Image (tube, coloured by chain):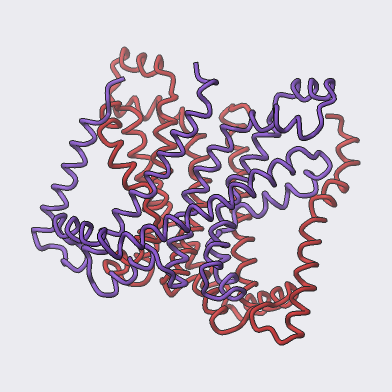
Chain colours: A purple, B red
Amino acid sequence: MKSAWPASLALLAALIALWWAASLTGWFSPAFLPTPQATAASLTEGLRGDLLQASLATIGRMLQGWLLAAVAGIALGAAIASSATLRPWVQPTLEFLRPLPASAVMPLAIALYGLSPAMVLSVVAFGALWPTLLATVHGITSVEPRLIDVARCLRLSRAAFLWKMGLPNAVPDILAGLRLSLTVALIVSTLGEMLASQDGLGLAILVASRAFRASELFACLVLLSLIGLAGHALLVLAGRWLLRGQRH
Amino acid sequence: MPEPRGSRRWPWRTLRATAFPLLLLGLFEATARRAAALGSEVLAPPSAALRALAQAALDGSLWPATGFTLGAAALGLLLGAGLGTLAGVTLGLSARASRATFLSIELLRPLPSVALLPLAMLVFGFGTGLETSLVAFGTFWPQLLLIQAAVRRVDPQLLELGRLLGLSTAQRIRKIVLPAIVPRVFTALRLGMGFALVIAVTVELAGNPHGMGYAMLLAQQSLAPAMMIGWLAWIGVIGVLLNTTMLRLQRALDRRMGVAV
């Protein structure tokens, strides 16, 4: 397979050139379409001060919420999936809760905990929990039935079954769930920063737009996209490394 | 599976499925009642939320907000999924196009719709345009990727046959590619509908003063916890109803298309 880099870098450069041309024509108000140079200037200036702080705050919030969700999601998922008695009681409720928008819980959390960092973090973790939890349950319950018979013959304890068969079988599903959880964590972090006025890129975007500083707003968007891209790429690499034995 | 056994197990299964949520609701009711007795203005028991919801349904304030959110979500999904399907088919068929666009897509895709809200607000102002455009942006990327993957799975021999028969590109798309990917388009649409509802409600929470999300935020800010929890439950019920309807439709479609269920 040919490398995708030259062609896609060329297209990206062309898109930026198009953006530059569009911002020069004057058809679009500079209040919402800055030139690429202005955006780059805001970016370099911001990275020496506020925007670096804001990015670190958003990254920290996203990672903390995601880690909480990952630990809780895998543990709860493993507990639910490995217990044939528990599952029929709990799983229908989980399936029912899945389509509930995580962001809709935000007003309830604000009412309960106020506009605090802990409130935002708890909603981030809550929202990011579902993809990992459901993926873990799915991955463990789809273990080859003959392997379950083997486990029964060997009289493996539940912990041993989970550790030796259930979780290894679920790794691809859990990785997919973790990727989705990270996306959700970034979205809910941004929303939480906007609604609860917490330090971070969400708030920085809001402040920039209220002051009609479009170049700063675009700089924040660039940073958010890079954060999302980096997180996704790291998880894909981690997944490849974890699954290296299973690839032929 | 023999029929009598299934019918004997049916009430038992429903009982087990509903016991856990009922227990949770009961706990919530008890906690909220105790909080309300202590003078809480932020929590209300589910029974009060249900009453507030029934009230809103009767006096008619429930329906316009619901209609606005669902309308904006549907319009945005139509736009985003339509363009996403077009782009997905193009990129799925042309390896060169998919190589060239990969970096730009990976850079634009992770942008949360809600982060684009202030920018979209400057462009569109408040209202349907704002919400529709953000739902369209958010549903475009997953649709594109799912359709691209679906088109890549179309049997290459069929495409080769189409070429040998002298079919034009448009004919090959219409006669070979589209029929082959219909079930996956539907799956993508079902997922996209979930995203669309989430994005619409989120946009309303974060600034667009219309719809269910805004009504919920308003209830919270005016210290009407029963109505706020009522809205939360209502949004959840709508999400579940849409999802189960689409799942049913999909199973029916899969059976008709001869896909192994």
| Residue under the image location 66 percent in, 79 percent down | B55
Residue A126 locus on image (x, y percent):
59, 57
Residue B261 locus on image (x, y percent):
64, 30
| Residue under the image location 61 percent in, 82 percent down | B224
Taking the view exactly as shown, the residue that stands out farthest to the front is: A48
Side of A43 relative to A201 (left or right): left
Residue B179 locus on image (x, y percent):
45, 29
| Residue under the image location 86 percent in, 37 percent down | B6
Nearest the eye: B25 or A232: A232
Nearest the eye: A71 or B233: A71
Q: Is residue B226 above or below residue B83?
A: below
Residue A71 locus on image (x, y percent):
62, 47
Q: Is residue A131 above or below residue B200?
A: above
Q: Is residue A84 above or below residue A185?
A: above
Q: Is residue B246 above or below residue B225?
A: above
| Residue under the image location 16 percent in, 66 percent down | A30
Side of B42 relative to A66 (left or right): right
Nearest the eye: A102 or A219: A219
Residue A39: image quadrant is: bottom left
Taking the view exactly as shown, the residue that stands out farthest to the bottom is: B39
Residue A187: image quadrant is: bottom left
Side of A32 relative to B237 (left or right): left
The quadrant the N terminus of chain A occupies is top left
Side of A194 relative to A213 (left or right): right
Taking the view exactly as shown, the residue that stands out farthest to the left is: A25
All told, the count of numbered labels is 0
